[in-house]
Image: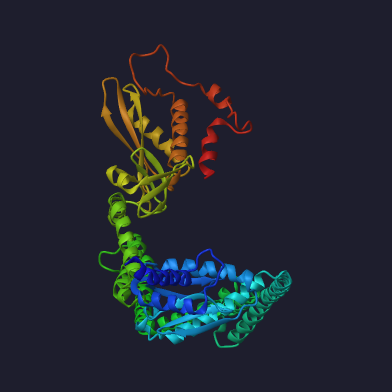
Amino acid sequence: MIANRLPRIIICALGVFLLAPAASGQTPPASEQTQAIDAAAGTAQPSGQVATLTYANRPIAEFRATVMSRTPAERVIGANYVLARLVDEHPRGIVGTSVLGEARVVNIDGRVVFVILPQDVDVLIDETIDRKTAAAAAQLQLAFNEVVELRTPSRLARAVGLAVVATLVYFVVLALLVRGHRASARRLSETTQRQIERLPGGEIISRASRATELVRHLTAIVWMLLALLVTDMWVTFVLRRFPYTRPWGESMRASALHLFGSLGEMFVNALPGLGTVLVVVVITRVFTRLAGALFDAVDRRSVALPGIYPETAQPTRRIVVALLWLFALIVSYGYLPGSDSDAFKGASVFVGLIVSLGSTGIMNQIMSGFTITYSRALRVGDFVKVGDVEGTVTHMGPLATKIKTPHRVEVTMPNAIVISNATINYSRDAETGVYVHTTVTIGYDAPWRQVRGLLLAAAERTPGIRSDPKPEVLQAALQDFYVEYRLLVSLERAHHRGLILDTLHANIQDAFNEAGVQIMSPHYETDPHAPKLVSRADWQGIKAPTDPDQPETSRGKTESAAP
């Protein structure tokens, strides 16, 4: 029984040897090859897998069939092994094909390299076994010749020389393109500027249209395209000089043309949507300009809108413009190219997630900023006191407010903190006068009319205090041993409050010393043996250490006038 099956076993073994040759260098006789290939072809079955035979960086053929338990990938390995031996044994080999039943044999100088079977044909793309075999033989001949070329030093040296020369020429051309771009951009911009200035109102048109900038940008785009074209030619030429990179050079231009064609097709298909987006943008731009003009007029007090004040006009303008553009984005979202793609949707989800994660604290600050703005508690330039911070408001943002203190220290306060503290605005009624007070305590033995006159005289001597409204003196309290007097003054510039009060306090001391009235602050416990006063001979002779030529009494006036 074994003797009867022995011929079939031998034939099957020869078929395996021919379809994916082993290490043996012997070539079976033609009749045995034919029988082995015919027997192997009878066992071919579709595998559901695809393996591509690639040689010298060129795709040769695709295998889809399993032959005598050998998968397409194993058939590729066998064919590569045969080719590696043949390039040494037959460096000038000629690729040929032959028909054996339903199979097609591809060989080099009669040596079988691989076999294409009907099960290897992809019928879904209208492929036939004859066309597939012819294409595989042509690709194999080209790849085989390139492998031989790769092993020829003289041809490689020539390829390297051509590549070096092409590279030098490329850089020279690129330098010329850069110089040409600079010269043409300058000349075209100047010509455009002269032509526009010849028109009526040309200077205004030039500033509004920015035509020269547009010309420069268009010129840069043209020269950039030329540079890309030259770069493509250089890369393609260099890649084609070497056998291994030659397939890349051959496919590079076709790939570029295919890419540009696809982009052009996408652009044409997107034109209706882009036109809609353009219309939405233009309409939104018109409305934002109208809103800007309207709120600018409110800011200049030339137009009155119910509920909108000059100090809230610009913040309201920014909010309205932001809402208009947000509405425009919502309307035009569906018309944007790629808006229905998974990448676009994923980016939208990611942005929404980031906003939702960080929105709690941010929204608290933004809503606090709205409260500050529309309550009109502060505005830029006001001299205020927020909590323990006193200074001039330099910036009011959606998240924080910046205050510069008299010591020139900038304090950044989150809007939520500003809202949670009491705010004193010394500049809000500066036109009519904002009162600032200082307090002294004087004993009952000093006539109150005299004390009142001394305080008003000190206020009159102090620069920076307004005469209208006039300073006032109030007897704030009658304590056990002294009377508490409160001097109210209106400042010309609230920003200099600290310096003006410093000068005022100095003048109060001078006035009371001149009159011989003792100031009882901070506390009165018992009558001293002598009034606590500075004699005229003493305080008039003392000079300021910072200014030896100026009396002490005038130092406060000089400092207060410096700001």
Is residue 231 shown to the viewer in this render? Answer: no
Which quadrant, please, contains the N terminus? bottom left
Is residue 354 shown to the viewer in this render? Answer: yes
Q: Is residue 437 above or below residue 193?
A: above
Looking at the image, which is closer to me, 6 or 378? 6
Relative to 348, is 86 on the left or the right?
Answer: right
Relative to 504, is 227 on the left or the right?
Answer: right
Relative to 242, is 264 on the left or the right?
Answer: left
Looking at the image, which is closer to me, 123 or 540? 123
Pinpoint residue 191: horizontal percent, then vertical percent: 64, 84
Q: Please tell me in which quadrant of the rendered image residue 111 appears.
A: bottom right
Pinpoint residue 108: horizontal percent, then vertical percent: 57, 78
Pinpoint residue 475: horizontal percent, then vertical percent: 29, 32
Pinpoint residue 224: horizontal percent, then vertical percent: 59, 76
Residue drawn 54% across the image and 65% down it:
24
Residue drawn 38% across the image and 40% down it:
389
Residue drawn 51% across the image and 83% down it:
97
